[in-house]
Amino acid sequence: MLTASSRTHLLTGVRVAEFCSVAAGPFCGMLLADLGADVIKVEPPEGDALRQWPPLTAGDSENFASLNRNKRSIVLNLKDPADVAVALEIIAGSDVLLENSRPGVMARLGLGYPQIKHKFPRLVYCSISAFGQTGPRAQEGGFDLTIQAASGIMSVTGEPNGDPVKCGVPISDFSSGLYAAFAIAAAIVRARAEGVGAWLDIPMLGCSLGVAALQTSEYFGTGRSPGRLGSAHPRNAPYQRYRAADGDFVIAAGNQKLWIAVCQVVGLPELVQDPRFLTTTDRARNQHLLRELLEARFKLASVDDWIRDFNEGGIPHARINDFATALADPQVQALGWVMPLSLPGGGQTRTFGSPLRIDGESPTVYRHPPALGEHTATVKAEMGSGKVK
């Protein structure tokens, strides 16, 4: 266990009661915990379902560990009135309640916001759900895959003539967790200044559409839904994946200066004055032809050769890394983002820590991901007799 730094613990003194499972809610809770919030993860007797997801190390889920570091776990059966009373006492001592159940579930347990807001007027109550707390689809459940489909994200992901595919990372889950953490931090400021809490409604569908701002604005401006472009960009070129003699890479020449640099590097200076490629709009309109011209040159040399030339030419570029290569990148190593992590069963692993830097320091792993119910006795002792205050 590493020592927590007060420099990075901007949320010291904030307590969060987390009633969440799987991804969006736990990710939000971890973001708050990384910054020093005391996050008490309230789990059912069977635990967060993510605890069962492989890979398992010494019996502990690496997936669960990646979203639940720096938290404490208490087991409560919320169908038992005695345990509901304990939950209410935890809430009474908390600044934030975070939940990601389907709308209505917390209310049936006696823990819905309308039921408890008068007892805890300073409470920031954050609800993450698939479609939001109101509206015709509010009662529907959802997961990252279904929200990617419903939001339009899958319609713009994949090759132009291929099938629609989901983004390779759970963007709907994690963007919702980010929106929730941002909203919670803002609401805490008001709660502490004015003594007024809030009910934060975080719909995964809305968050997914929110991070698709370039796509929605394209539709609003043209009346046409954007389509799949593979790695290409609708408004910039050359700005995509290209094939060299021995593999693939990407370049992103997003302005005129960089376009001129690309022409110099590939030995095609005449393209700068070619009427088909004069402006960014021209190049985007004719990017299929442009790709053919550039790839004819790129296939004459290796990825290493082109990476060297792009570096010398100041052109933004990247190899297409797998995660093993990405995590071994010298920049990742220099900034210490990969951290050792002890698992509750005694196993040792690594985790990708917080990428933030606060006054030159990164938040640390100061508490291992908890075993199921590891802190039940401790938390109950902190709460006192178990009776609601």
Image (cartoon, grey):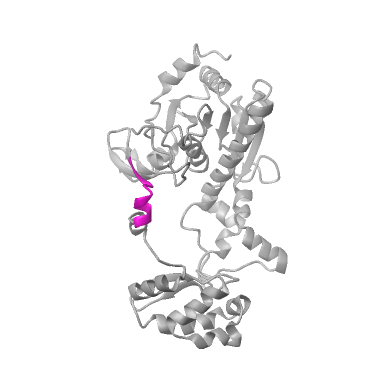
The answer to whether any part of residue 152 appears in the image is yes
Q: Residue at x 66, y 34 (%)?
A: 199
**Residue 331, located in which quarter of the rendered image?**
bottom left
Q: Vertical placement of 321 versus 130: above or below?
A: below
Q: Quadrant of the N terminus?
A: top left
Residue 349: percent from left, percent from top: 30, 42
User: 112 or 13, which is in the foreground?
Assistant: 13
Q: Quadrant of the C terminus?
A: top right
Direction from residue 351 to residue 143 in the image, left or right:
right
**Residue 63, located in which quarter of the rendered image?**
top left
User: 178 or 139, which is in the foreground?
Assistant: 178
Start and end of the magenta stretch? 329-340
**Residue 312, located in which quarter of the rendered image?**
bottom left
Q: Residue at x 67, y 24 (%)?
A: 121
Magenta-span inclusion, residue 309: no
The answer to whether any part of residue 57 appears in the image is no
